[in-house]
Image (tube, rainbow, N blue to C red):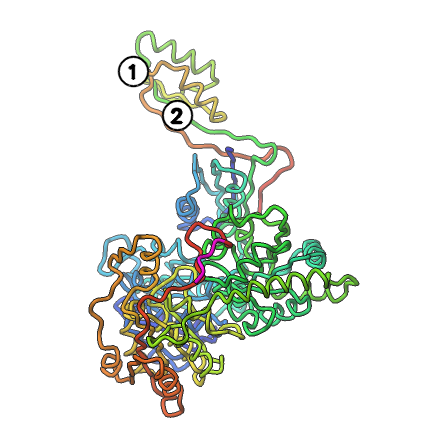
Amino acid sequence: MELTGAEITVRCLAEEGVEYVFGYPGGAVLNIYDAIYQQDKFKHVLVRHEQAAVHAADGYARATGRTGVALVTSGPGATNAVTGIATAYMDSIPMVVISGQVPTPAIGMDAFQEVDTVGITRPCVKHNFLVKDIRDLASTIKKAFYIASTGRPGPVLVDIPKDVTQFTTEFSYPKSVSLRSYNPVTKGHSGQIKRAVQMLLEAKRPMIYAGGGVILSDAAEQLTELTRLLGFPCTNTLMGLGGFPATDPLSVGMLGMHGTYEANMAVQHSDVLVAIGARFDDRVIGSPEHFYQEERKIIHIDIDPSSISKRVRVDVPIVGNVPEVLTEMIKLIKASKEKPDQTALKTWLTQIELWRARDCLKYDRHSDIIKPQFVLEKLHEITGGDAFVTSDVGQHQMWAAQFYKFDKPRRWINSGGLGTMGFGLPAAMGVQLAHPGAMVACVTGEGSIQMNIQELATCKQFNIPLKIILLNNRYLGMVRQWQEFFYGERYAESYMDTLPDFVKLAEAYGHHGRRIDNPAEVEDALKWAFSDEMKEKLVFLDFRTDQTENVYPMIPGGKGLSEMILV
Amino acid sequence: MRHIISLLMENEAGALSRVAGLFSARGYNIESLTVAPTEDATLSRMTIVTRGSDEVIEQITKQLNKLIDVVKVVDLSEAGHIERELMLVKVRAEGEWREEMKRMSDIFRGRIIDVTDKTYTIEMTGAGHKLDAFLEALDKGAILETVRTGASGIGRGDRILKF
């Protein structure tokens, strides 16, 4: 039997086991929406802006490891999706975005709602396709899912002209796909792995530096086993939080621009550094010149060869899938007669404890104004450290990363690479739909939340009971902080003069809200939000926090890891 | 350092723009770029001449390899290779120039492939510096038009880039 292109698209998604499609209809995708209407294999979530559709698919992917799916129309639908796609690209999130396109004869004619979607998205996708022939449709969608989810994951866009969704052809979904031009390596080079293990066993001041690749490849278990087996200290990047339990004594917390003193000092002074699924990003290591230490050896495990020796020269590169490489390393270490030098390790861990004693995250616990750090500590306490936490971008993001101690992977969901304000709320929707019974908190600021606040309507329509933790300091806090430190306290456009009444706003969308002005009310408000009574309801907590609080430690832009500004 | 990179890629719409886009997005230089289908019509072969430090060239080859449509990448300048470029030059061929242009073309082993009573069109192939030398040797006033293809390269001997 012949099916239309629209029916084929929908069948392909069903074949891929897609659970949710996040999207927004429009002219070019009307046939696909008609086919969606007539199926029951997956649910469609109608967002209120295409950017949110992509962020929601992204949040879903981050929380599950499965490929997120978004569907948008041509022209403005596609351009609105671009920020979401770029966000997913920078953080290597598996995602398939289907966009409508004007009919093939209209392409290039400046038709209504026409834009060169493949051209616009090319620099921010892992790959993209324009399907011009319906006979290629099913195989293209198959390829899209394959490419998105294998190797270093990333978003793949499939642009489908409207006439292709109307034409008919025989449908058969390919069982497998192989591409001669795309064969990601999975197994690491065994000689290199042996060299790395030898180097680790001989280290005096070893350090494990684990990034988002550990989360993406589901290697938290192997990382934890390796770290504990060796007894080495471990730091996680912003993207890698939860890859190693933050409450483990071997954890030194996050490193980088707002990393802990102990993590940054330990990385800088280590003699063997093993980077696992991390890419020596500028926000993580600061300036490469300052980072460079002649006597330090670096081992780098990554699935993407182009991540290796990009910003920092490494001594032992291992290209491979992180869990497989770590498993191999664990096996070799267990089989080895050599053990790490316990005396040296003890001295090293003692040094790290001295750095830790600097208590770099301290803040005024007796303030009569709400300290944002206090809210996050309480959030951790009241959720038992077991919530999924999404964030937007800015000070609140850094405080959440510092103060919510993530013990499990895929719990911390934020836009690390692109730094997209407006990510937190729609991403949280995807997370909550993926884990219906779970506690999902969106930690946000009054700047970020307003970038996608319209999604409160989506949450109402689909009964998504998020807990929104707004740290409201009436400033674009991170901008304000930079202006205070580096621009002579000239606060150009960083003060938010006119803010809505967020409680009333939440209520206007059919939700519940509370404004909290006093530190004594923080705990009660959080308990209320996470109570059984509010379990099925979205709660919007507007915490009026200290306007002048800054994120410490801080490495100024272009400076090195040990050049922190401390509180 | 000047490098000459050869690659095989799927002969698909947009493949060229992926490569060109990669170079501009990451700030790499392109001195020249040539592309055409191979004997296997599903594959195109591209030759890119670029400049950069060893680190940059390493990144360029890795980033090219990362493009989904790219099947194989080789840095020809790592070992023995041959490169050739084609140039067409239209020159004045009136009066005293008529004999002079014919002579210069012969010296540089060019071929005159179009003749009118006022012009010659000379075809010449060679490494880029030979074509440069020819243009240098000509009287500037005689040159009416030039067009060059950019370099195509191939490895010497047993070095073969094939899928």
Residue A8 in sight here? no
**Percent x, y for residue A421?**
34, 65
Q: Residue furthest bottom?
A: A533
Q: Which residue lies furthest to the front in this view?
A: A366
Looking at the image, residue A370 lies above or below residue A200: below
Q: Which disc, if any, is residue B118? A: 1
In the drawing, does residue A183 fall left or right of residue A439?
right
Residue pointed to by mark 2: B88
Q: Residue at x 74, y 67 (%)?
A: A334
**Percent x, y for residue A49?**
28, 70
From the viewer's side, name the closer residue of A376 and B33: A376
Element carrying mark 2: strand
Residue A515 in sight here? yes
Sequence-wise first label, 2 or 1: 2
Query: Is residue A31 one of those drawn in magenta?
Result: no
In the drawing, does residue A374 fall left or right of residue B141?
right
At label 1, which amino acid type do we have? Lys
Q: Which portion, as a residue range, is magenta?
A: A563-567
- Number of labels in the image equals 2
At label 2, which amino acid type do we have? Leu
